[in-house]
Image: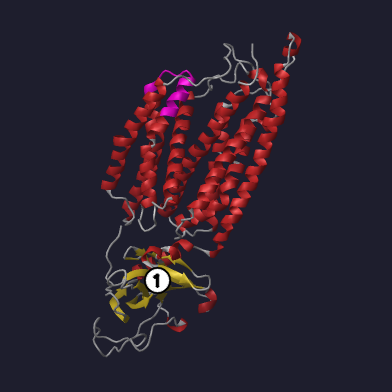
């Protein structure tokens, strides 16, 4: 929620140590200040749609907002941990003038320099915000951070809030005023190392898949197709032996699998569309909330993909309850997200937080869900059930084949846990920057890198699932449907574990509500990642199995 402040600024009119107000804070208010300083709360300001930023002079980059105050180390005050408030701010506004192009001046920069000053004034005079002259800073004595005169927040005290306004001419044009925010931390060069790391994983997996496809599979297919006698056919082993069961419907909830796979296609279409719009420059950071709005709208409009693919898979599995399948596809994932989001919002309402989503916005989201997403899923499901069943190259036997005893390393849980490591490893470095943008006041706008990482993730999920599926079929275990989805989808478990590590090591969030918000949102992100990676692995494996069994002769 954006609100107007009490600060008064006139175009190109500087001010020095202007008094905003005087406030007597009691012990409870001081305790609250100390709490928000410990929790590293920051103040976000906006001028002419530019977020206020603090500049790091050493590395020449900025971070959004400025902290409420700071904590001095124990050695500073003789072993005591002291809290100090930033009660004075220097507002630096950069402007650009070009009388050949436009009239007047345009604001192209907004920076903030905070100070902690225990203001002093002549107590013999009555205090007046407009006439009182402070001895600690005035027009002749600019504000400065004096360690011996910081504004302490340990006891009830009077605090005078002041500010400077400084106007600086700049050569930055209006079109490039956001560049400083998008520059980010100079350590961002690690993006290149992230790409190289991910490419190494993909090249390794591609080599393994190529070896399987070009050498092992070709040899297997040639051997199977050259078998002439009954004795030779009876002695066959490996993946051909399960050709009569490989396309048997999953034993556990084929409807749920089809719903998850269909929703995963919807998330995939949303991700690809969002990345395309971002690369084309349609999602400018100047439009606050533009990225989140685009994600929501594109997810809603991609509902037909979920309905179509869920219906086709459910039809392949021989399902008859098409109405239940369609309703589940339209409601399962959105319902989980809605319950989590609404629960978190109730907590924010109870705390009186300004970030709580208004009731009208909640109604608009529900209207989008039932008014647009649900009908689109129904349309996609209709065409999916009307379409012919996915063609499979071999018939399914009436009596299922007994699966031989498996070794410990082929156990489903071990295979699923192993399958998610490489997909997560391909994105873990880039994930650090995304997490910093979400929780550490940075702006993430390197969508070119992110698109490359997305393609690497797609390749990694597809290849690792194909490799795992091949080894599973060679062990004559034909129950690959769920395992193919969960093998690549298990990367979401590692993502959530990474979020737990990030919470413990990088953030200093205290309080139940703040922690619940963090883990609630990260669970939603992990759930979406699970559907995305699971669907990629599932459909890659489906293509692989159809391909190899279509290449052999089966009587």
Please provide percent x and percent y for residue 100.
31, 71
Name the residue at 49% across, 43% down: 526
Please tell me whether the stretch drawn in magenta is mainly helix, strand or loop.
helix
Relative horizontal placement of residue 482, taking residue 86 as reference (left or right): right
Examine the structure image and report whether residue 102 is included in the region drawn in magenta.
no
Q: Nearer the viewer, residue 536 or 484?
A: 536
Please provide percent x and percent y for residue 554.
64, 14
Query: Would residue 440 be seen by someone viewing this image from the given angle?
Result: yes
Q: Mark 1 highlights which residue?
A: 111
Q: What is the total number of numbered labels drawn onto the structure image?
A: 1
Query: Which region shows up in magenta?
Result: 308-323
**Quadrant in the rendering for residue 157:** bottom left
Relative horizontal placement of residue 519, taking residue 94 as reference (left or right): right
Name the residue at 37% across, 70% down: 110
Tell which residue pokes out farthest to the top in this image: 230
Seen in the picture, residue 489 relative to 449 is either above or below; the reply is above
Which class describes the residues within 10 Å of circle 1: few (<14), some (14-19), or many (20+)?
many
């Amino acid at each position: 929620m954006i609100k107007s402040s009490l600060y008064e600024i006139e175009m190109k009119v500087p001010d020095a140590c202007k008094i905003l107000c005087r406030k007597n804070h009691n012990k409870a208010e001081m305790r609250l200040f100390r709490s928000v300083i410990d929790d590293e709360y920051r103040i976000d300001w906006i001028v002419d749609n530019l977020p206020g930023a603090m500049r790091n002079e050493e590395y020449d980059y900025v971070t959004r907002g400025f902290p409420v105050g700071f904590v001095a180390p124990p050695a500073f005050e003789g072993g005591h941990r002291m809290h100090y408030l930033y009660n004075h701010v220097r507002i630096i506004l950069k402007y650009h003038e070009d009388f050949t192009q436009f009239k007047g001046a345009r604001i192209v920069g907004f920076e903030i320099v905070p100070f902690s000053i225990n203001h002093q004034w002549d107590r013999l005079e009555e205090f007046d915000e407009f006439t009182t002259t402070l001895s600690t800073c005035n027009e002749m004595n600019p504000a400065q951070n004096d360690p011996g005169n910081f504004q302490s927040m340990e006891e009830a005290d009077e605090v005078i809030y002041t500010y400077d306004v400084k106007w600086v001419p700049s050569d930055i044009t209006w079109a490039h005023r956001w560049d400083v925010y998008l520059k980010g931390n100079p350590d961002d060069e690690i993006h290149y190392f992230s790409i190289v790391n991910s490419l190494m994983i993909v090249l390794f997996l591609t080599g393994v898949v190529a070896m399987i496809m070009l050498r092992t599979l070709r040899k297997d297919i040639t051997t199977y197709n050259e078998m002439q006698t009954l004795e030779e056919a009876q002695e066959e082993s490996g993946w051909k032996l399960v050709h009569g069961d490989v396309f048997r419907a999953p034993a556990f909830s084929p409807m749920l699998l089809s719903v998850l796979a269909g929703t995963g296609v919807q998330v995939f279409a949303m991700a690809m569309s969002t990345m395309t719009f971002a690369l084309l420059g349609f999602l400018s950071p100047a439009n606050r909330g533009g990225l989140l709005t685009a994600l929501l709208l594109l997810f809603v409009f991609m509902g037909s993909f979920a309905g179509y693919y869920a219906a086709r898979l459910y039809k392949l599995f021989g399902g008859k309850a098409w109405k239940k399948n369609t309703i589940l596809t339209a409601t399962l994932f959105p319902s989980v997200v809605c319950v989590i989001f609404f629960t978190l919002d109730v907590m924010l309402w109870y705390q009186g937080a300004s970030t709580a989503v208004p009731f009208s916005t909640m109604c608009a989201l529900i209207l989008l869900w039932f008014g647009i997403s649900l009908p689109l899923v129904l349309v996609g499901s209709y065409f999916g059930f009307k379409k012919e069943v996915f063609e499979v190259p071999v018939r399914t036997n009436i009596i299922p084949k007994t699966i031989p005893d498996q070794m410990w390393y082929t156990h489903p849980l071990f295979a699923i846990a192993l399958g998610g490591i490489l997909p997560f490893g391909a994105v873990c470095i880039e994930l650090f920057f995304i997490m910093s943008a979400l929780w550490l006041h940075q702006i993430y706008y390197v969508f070119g890198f992110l698109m490359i990482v997305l393609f690497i993730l797609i390749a990694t999920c597809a290849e690792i699932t194909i490799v795992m599926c091949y080894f599973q079929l060679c062990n004559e275990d034909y129950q690959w449907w769920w395992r193919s989805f969960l093998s690549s989808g298990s990367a979401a478990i590692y993502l959530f574990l990474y979020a737990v590590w990030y919470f413990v090591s990088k953030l200093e969030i205290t309080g139940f509500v703040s922690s619940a918000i963090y883990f609630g949102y990260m669970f939603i992100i992990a759930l979406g990642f699970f559907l995305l990676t699971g669907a990629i692995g599932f459909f890659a494996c489906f293509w692989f199995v159809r391909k190899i069994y279509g290449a052999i002769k089966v009587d």
